Image (cartoon, rainbow, N blue to C red):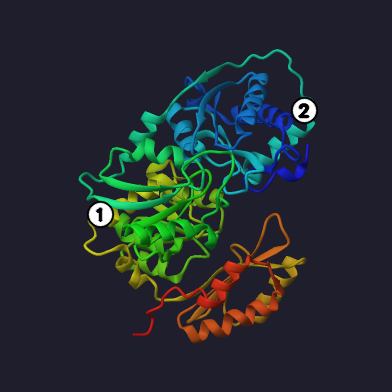
Amino acid sequence: MDFSIFKAYDIRGIYPDQLNEEDAWKIGCATARFLPSLVTGYERGQANARSLCVGRDMRTHSKALANALIEGINAAGINVIDIGMIDTPQMYFAVNHLGTCGGVQVTASHNPAKYNGFKISGLQAKPVGVDTGLKDIKHIATALIHTKGRVTGSIEKYDLTADYKNHVLKFLKPNIKPMKIAIDASNGMAGKMIPALFGDLPIEIIALNFEHTGKFKHEPNPLIEENLAGVKTTVKKNKCNFGICFDGDADRLMMVDEKAANISCDLLTALMVPYFLKKQPKATVVYDLRSSWVVIEEIIKNGGTPRRERVGHAFMKKALRDSHAIFGGEVSGHFYYRDNFYADSGLITFVHVLNIVSEAKVPISELIKPLRRYYSSGEVNFEVEDKQAKMNELAKRYNDGDIDYLDGVTVRYKDWWFNCRPSNTEPLLRLTVEAKTKKTFEEKFPEIAKQLGRPVKEKKKTRKKRKKTAIKKKKTHKK
């Protein structure tokens, strides 16, 4: 077994060189030995306490890996509820809806077609990462010998589409107005779930890349600018209200307005703040530390309690649970909801956007316009071998600012700030710089970037666009 497939939050590798059916069997068996041991008290008496949900995405090798995974789970004496080809957020719903001790989704999310992997959830769909069980599962799996043995677990097949649809649509307000929306499913799971869940609504969906062919027309990562080209062209050509591009397993999305301008995910978080705080005044809202100052300003302005958190779904979900926050947003396109078991969901985010746009008297661009008040680099990657030493250098040089080390190093001044954090798996530092004025941004971003050395090479189109726009969040800042 290739140990490198075990990442910080999931298991992922190239099929079949790094990850194959034998690995899947061992991981299934190890997961089935570990997760039920965490069930205590009341949960132990529930009907499905010794069962695991298993789902998969649309990749050509996902079914074979899921079958091997199921065999491994059964070999450990644990039952399986096979819920078929689903989006990853449906797994979080299934674990809670069926009361299992956890679940495994076979998916490589936004990675290219040659990749696959496993996202593991525990009781109540709590994430299983390196610090919450994945290290234990790795230890068990790498010591196992694949043997058929005597299988003692059972398999049941469930189709949860109807129940899942009811759950997602319970967040939709009645009588939404007719809209025209461009949706790029990235040849991923949104291509199955969007028609199944939203086909009855008074919205016209112009579908891009909904088919499952085993290939991706573009990489299923909506955060890469060139992957938004299709949805932007469609929005402008068809005069849509807005457009959305989903990632491969439909737990993340990127949105563009009716003019095909990007709506960064921190600005989308800020947009949703008054919408949620109107439902529950003074509630906590969680945001990741890369987010624009706009987010905390909107939370405070609307009477909420801001909670700043480190990057990553495991940390965001724990923060939501600990603070009983009403929702949270990440720059990566993950949005989390208290009433969705503190889990993220691209489809539920889509529902909340439908509600906001339907109630608004102006186009989405006008709603976002007042939030485009600062200048940001977005997150830019730099190749750095000694990541900690470089972060120490930055902390020392900018020690006259307000410094914290929640995730990497963050330094704040009255008119600008930056965060520099390390990649968990690569020799990369990720830099975000934001300033209140264009002049300050154009001074500080190159100043820090120069200290980090060589940026990761970008494709020509993306590099040209970054140079042209300087990633400015507001074109009309000075009027």
Please identify the quadrant where the N terminus is shown.
top right
Q: In which quarter of the image is residue 406?
A: bottom right
Residue under label 1: 358
Which amino acid lies under the numbered mark 2 shown in the image of this protein? Leu
Depth order, front residue of 221/422: 221
Query: Residue 129, how many percent across, how many down?
Result: 62, 44
Give the residue furthest to the front: 237
Depth order, front residue of 262/3: 262
Q: Residues within 10 Å of mark 1 (few under 14, many from 20)?
A: some
Question: What residue is drawn where x is 42% and y is 28%?
Answer: 160
Query: Residue 133, how many percent across, how many down?
Result: 64, 39
Q: Can residue 324 be seen in this view?
A: yes
Question: What residue is drawn where x is 68% and y is 67%?
Answer: 457
Depth order, front residue of 252/14: 14
Question: What residue is drawn where x is 51% and y is 39%?
Answer: 88
Image position of 453 (left or right of 271): right
Q: Find out whether the residues at labels 1 and 2 contact each other: C-beta distance under 8 Å.
A: no
Please identify the quadrant where the C terminus is shown.
bottom left
Position of 76 relative to 316 (above/below): above
Residue under label 2: 144
Q: Is residue 411 visible?
A: no
Image position of 134 (left or right of 437): right
Mark closer to the chain start, 1 or 2: 2
Image position of 311 (left or right of 170): right
Query: Residue 68, how many percent across, how many down?
Result: 66, 26
Question: What residue is drawn where x is 39% and y is 81%?
Answer: 477
Query: Residue 182, how many percent across, how many down?
Result: 38, 52
Q: Nearer the viewer, mark 1 or mark 2?
A: 1
Which amino acid lies under the numbered mark 1 shown in the image of this protein? Ser
Q: Residues within 10 Å of mark 2 (few under 14, many from 20)?
A: some
